[in-house]
């Protein structure tokens, strides 16, 4: 049975006065990386082994106080060969 790898990127709109707090919360999410940020936007990359795992991460981000929206802009999935992770 092959495993899957799912990767998505999100644009996250943030209240400017909550940016530092939101960044800390996102960096604490497993398999989440901050790619680009400015005063009101973050680009976040999430990895997971299923679409459900990605959706859980997006829901976590949307639930952070100060997040106005988290919009998926890219999604890729691929089957991994035996031994790849």
Image (spheres, helix red, strand yellow):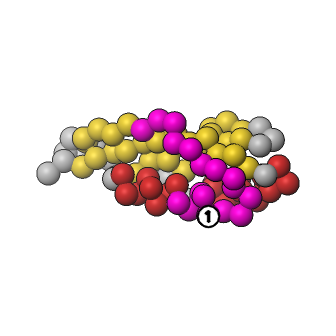
Q: Nearer the viewer, residue 41 or 46?
A: 41
At 82% across and 49% down in the image, what residue appears?
16
Position of residue 66 in the picture relative to residue 1 (left or right): right
Q: Quadrant of residue 17?
A: bottom right
* Residue that numbered label 1 is attached to: 63
Q: Would you say residue 77 sits in the magenta stretch?
A: no
Q: Would you say residue 62 sits in the magenta stretch?
A: yes
Residue 5 locus on image (x, y percent)? 34, 45
Q: Quadrant of residue 65?
A: bottom right
Residue 30 in view in this figure: no
At 60% across and 58% down in the image, what residue appears?
62
Against 22, is 5 above or below? above
Against 22, is 75 above or below? above
At 81% across and 41% down in the image, what residue appears?
39
Against 26, is 73 above or below? above
Question: What's drawn in magenta, residue-wise?
Answer: 59-75
* Circle 1: element type: loop
Residue 77 locus on image (x, y percent)? 33, 40
Q: Nearer the viewer, residue 61 or 79?
A: 61
Residue 18 locus on image (x, y percent)? 80, 56
């Amino acid at each position: 049975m092959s495993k899957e790898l799912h990767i998505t990127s999100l644009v996250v709109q943030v209240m400017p006065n909550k940016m530092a707090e939101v960044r800390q919360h996102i960096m604490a999410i497993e398999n989440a990386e901050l790619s680009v940020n400015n005063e009101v936007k973050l680009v976040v990359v999430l990895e997971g082994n299923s679409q459900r795992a990605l959706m859980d991460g997006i829901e976590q981000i949307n639930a952070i106080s100060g997040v106005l929206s988290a919009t998926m802009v890219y999604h890729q999935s691929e089957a991994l060969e035996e031994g790849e992770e």
